[in-house]
Each structure stands twice: as C-alpha cells, then as structure tokens.
C-alpha cells in the first residue's frame, strides 16, 4: 500500500483484498496496452474531470463533482487498493481504535457516488494535450485535480545517497504517508524495550502540524503504562511547541515529565542513521531508536506536472504554484490543487493547515468551482475552516483541540487566519473527536 511504489492491482488481487475490481478499460480500448495507449476513451461530449490521488481531498472532490455535475465523467486515479486514514492513526498505534476504524474499502464510495476509480500509477502529464500519463496508458481530461498529498523529502538530508535514504525509511520510518510504514511504526512502538527514542519534526509547513506532539504523548502513555525504561526526545525546528503550545506543554509537564523532553530550535543539519546520531542547531544527539520525519514537500505529481512554485530568487518552494483564492494553477487554470500539496495562501499565516479537515473542505470548494465554470456561472471564491483534536492521554482519554477560522481582510483583500486553542484537556473533546471523524468518513467514504 505504498503511495509512491504501488502499481496497478490486477482484478483478481483486488477481489482477493475484499474490494470490487474496477475495469481498467472499456471494450473500445486497445487489446494490448502500452504507455501510449489511450485508456477509458471519451464518452461523447461529457465533460471529464480526472483526479490524481484518492485520499481525503480526492475522494471528496470525486463525490461532489458527481453530485454537482451529474453528466460529468469523473475518474479518480489512485495507487492504493484501499483507503487508510492518517487522521486517527496515532490512536491506532496504541490500540485506542482498531485497524478497521482507519482502514476502509475505497471502491464502495466510487460505486455509491458513481465515479470511476482506477488503481494505477501516475507517471507524468502532457498538459498541452490535457492528458495524464499512467503506468498503463494515457487518460484525457478537461479539468485535472491534483490531490496526491506530500512526499518525504529525504534528499534534503541525504542528497543522492540512496543507501542512507533507504536505510532511514526502513529502520526509522516517519509513517506520515499512509502505507506499510504505518504498520512498521506500530510494531516499533509495541516492541520498544527502552532507551532514547528520538522524534524529528519537519520544518513548517508540514502535514498535520499538531500531530507529531500527539504521537509523542500517546507513545509516552504506552511507555508509562507498561513501565518501559524509555524516554522520548522531540527535536523541533520551531522556537516553541506550536500549534496549541500551552495544551501540549502542560501535558508534557503534568503527564510525562520523566519521559518527554522537548528541544526547540533543533533544525536538523545532519543525520547519520547508521551510527544513530543527529546534528541540529540545538546540538548533537544520539539515540537508541527513532522516528525520523524529513522535510515535507508537495507530492511527486506536482513536480511531474511542472507546477511547483518558485521563490523570488528562483528556488523551488516545494509546494504547488496556485491561485490562493481559486485553487487552480497560476499558469494553467484547467489544473486544480486539493489538500496537503497546496501552496501558500497568505502573507499573514502562509499555508492552510495540511490536514484531513482542510483537504475535505477544499475538495468540496474545488468541485463547486469546476461546476460553476462548466455551467457558465461566475466562480465564487470560498474559504475553508480547520478543526483538529489531539489525544494527549489514553487513560483517562483526554484531548485538546485547535480551530482555525478564515476571513478576507477588507483593506488588503488577503486571507487572514484566527487560531482558537482549547488547551485544557477533557474527555468531552475525545467524544467530539469521534463525532467529527464519523461525520467526515460518512461524507466521502459512504459509511
């Protein structure tokens, strides 16, 4: 289930995994497929929207495009045969929720909402021809949505040293992209016998900003509960815990004072995974085990499409170059961005939080924008919001939360963000968290 390497699942294997197989091609397609073959030939004059990436944002966009444009041909391309949720996965690490809670059949929502889902690898784009290149042929589009999430930018640490990259990924997985790393990390946590466990945090912006601290708290709870002689060292590139600084600092101090140590201003300068040593701006650290999260960047597909932004001095930003209010590429308004790969929005706060909540919300907005364009209506610039709950204690179950609200500043015309922290941990917030996730899952997973 590796998002970067999983290729198309044959129908027999798809059925063996407990999901309905989606036909790769129609009867009119060529009998022998090559990378130059056209798969899914067009059905008359129906508008076609192709979505690359079937996570929170891509599946949401697919559902609402079918609702808002009933005659549209909506095609979703995804590597993985099943859906695995990043949100709630920290709780899964310590068995607060089961595997069935975060892992779901991805074909069922396609059947329910009426879009086509293909299990395949996106390998490139011909934007001048409005074509997506997949591992099994070309697919034409009128509008394209890129919703592939993030990539782990190990090259920032290791350059072209593939041996170091592979060793780090295999021995100290970050588990921030839903794939086999999630299972590897759970096994690591449950087999941890003691010593110093180092967690590196990516520099902002990165996926789900408060979740690494939640992960540290829940692993610390596991260590405390099982009386494991272990400590967690959080190497944070930021000057303080953020977001929800007070709530997390209180949890570290009151619940895990002898387990969690937070080190601010610890931007990684050098990683030696073989000798278990990390050099940061805050000093050098040795570890017995680690969860090494490299910098995050937009998914590979944005780079393949040639739509990565650049800084004033011409360097890549690492994120999509997009219109901050309408979510399409600045250089190609037939291409839209949804979810964590999105670029900066505002000088005031930078990026929208790279969260499942925002991906779900932007998926709906982009579907509405495309529907308005196809129907010839004026496109309305809409704003999302964001809401995150983080469990910091598993017995009793207690959580904190953060909400982000957005509005357009009348004077500057720019989007402004208001952050609302709930720092006092309560059991009620845990209950709200489960209500929230069930509402989201029912929205795009049809459960």
Image (tube, rainbow, N blue to C red):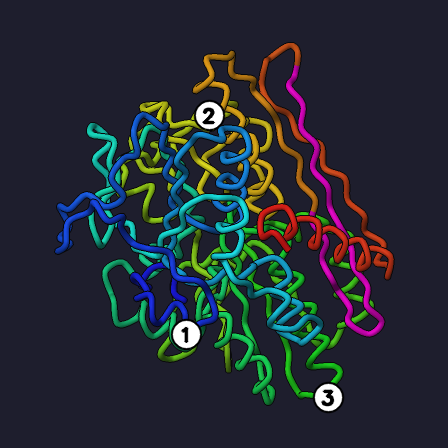
Residue 358 lies in the magenta-colored region: no
Secondary structure found at label 3: loop
| Camera-nearest residue between 217 and 258 | 217
Q: Which mark is residue 16?
A: 1
Answer with mark 1 or mark 2, whichever residue precedes in sequence: 1
Nearer the camera: disc 3 or disc 1: 1
Residue at horizontal 48 percent and vertical 41 percent from the top:
62
> Which labelled disc corresponds to residue 250?
none
- The relative height of residue 399 versus residue 139 in the rendered view (above or below) is below
Please report whichever mark, 2 or 3, sits nearer to the chain's N-terminal start. 3
Q: Position of residue 163 (x, y in %)?
A: 26, 72
Nearest to the eye among marks 1 and 2: give it: 1
Residue plotted at (36% across, 38% down): 50
What secondary structure is the magenta-colored segment mainly?
A: strand
Q: Is residue 259 above or below residue 355?
A: below
- Mark 3 and mark 1 lie on one chain; the one further toward the N terminus is 1
Residue 370 badge: 2
Q: In front here: 174 or 250? A: 174
Instruction: Report which residue position mark 3 lands on.
Output: 227
């Amino acid at each position: 289930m590796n998002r970067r390497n999983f290729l198309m699942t044959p129908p027999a294997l798809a059925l063996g995994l407990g999901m309905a197989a989606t036909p790769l091609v129609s009867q009119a397609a060529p009998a022998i497929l090559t990378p130059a073959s056209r798969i899914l030939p067009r059905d008359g004059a129906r508008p076609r929207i192709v979505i690359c990436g079937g996570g929170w944002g891509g599946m949401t966009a697919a559902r609402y495009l079918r609702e808002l444009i009933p005659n549209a041909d909506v095609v979703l391309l995804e590597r993985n045969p099943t859906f695995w949720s990043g949100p709630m996965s920290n709780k899964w690490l310590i068995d607060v929720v089961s595997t069935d809670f975060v892992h779901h059949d991805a074909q069922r929502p396609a059947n329910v909402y009426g879009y086509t889902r293909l299990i395949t690898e996106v390998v490139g784009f011909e934007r001048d021809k409005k074509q997506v290149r997949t591992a099994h042929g070309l697919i034409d589009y009128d509008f394209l949505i890129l919703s592939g999430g993030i990539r782990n930018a190990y090259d920032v640490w290791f350059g072209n040293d593939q041996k170091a990259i592979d060793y780090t990924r295999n021995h100290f997985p970050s588990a921030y992209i839903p794939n086999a790393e999630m299972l590897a990390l759970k096994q690591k946590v449950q087999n941890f016998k003691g010593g110093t466990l180092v967690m590196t945090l990516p520099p902002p912006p990165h996926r789900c900003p408060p979740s690494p601290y939640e992960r540290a708290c829940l692993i610390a709870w596991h260590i405390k509960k099982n009386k494991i002689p272990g400590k967690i060292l959080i190497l944070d590139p930021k000057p303080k815990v953020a977001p929800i600084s007070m709530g997390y600092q209180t949890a570290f101090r009151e619940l895990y004072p002898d387990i969690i140590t937070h080190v601010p201003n610890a931007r990684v300068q050098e990683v030696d995974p073989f000798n278990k040593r990390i050099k940061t701006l805050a000093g050098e650290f040795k570890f017995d085990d680690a969860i090494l999260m490299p910098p995050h960047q937009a998914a590979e597909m944005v780079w393949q499409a040639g739509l990565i932004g650049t800084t004033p001095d011409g360097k890549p930003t690492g994120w999509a170059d997009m219109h901050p209010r309408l979510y399409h590429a600045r250089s190609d308004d037939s291409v839209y961005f949804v979810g964590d790969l999105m670029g900066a929005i505002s000088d005031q706060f930078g990026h929208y939080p790279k969260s499942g909540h925002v991906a779900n919300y932007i998926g709906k907005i982009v579907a509405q924008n495309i529907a308005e364009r196809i129907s010839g209506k004026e496109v309305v610039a809409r704003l999302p919001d964001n809401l995150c709950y983080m469990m910091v204690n598993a017995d009793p179950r207690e959580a904190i939360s953060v909400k982000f609200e957005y509005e357009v500043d009348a004077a500057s015309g720019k989007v402004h963000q208001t952050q609302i922290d709930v720092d006092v941990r309560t059991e009620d917030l845990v209950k709200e968290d489960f209500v929230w996730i069930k509402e989201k899952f029912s929205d795009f997973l049809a459960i």
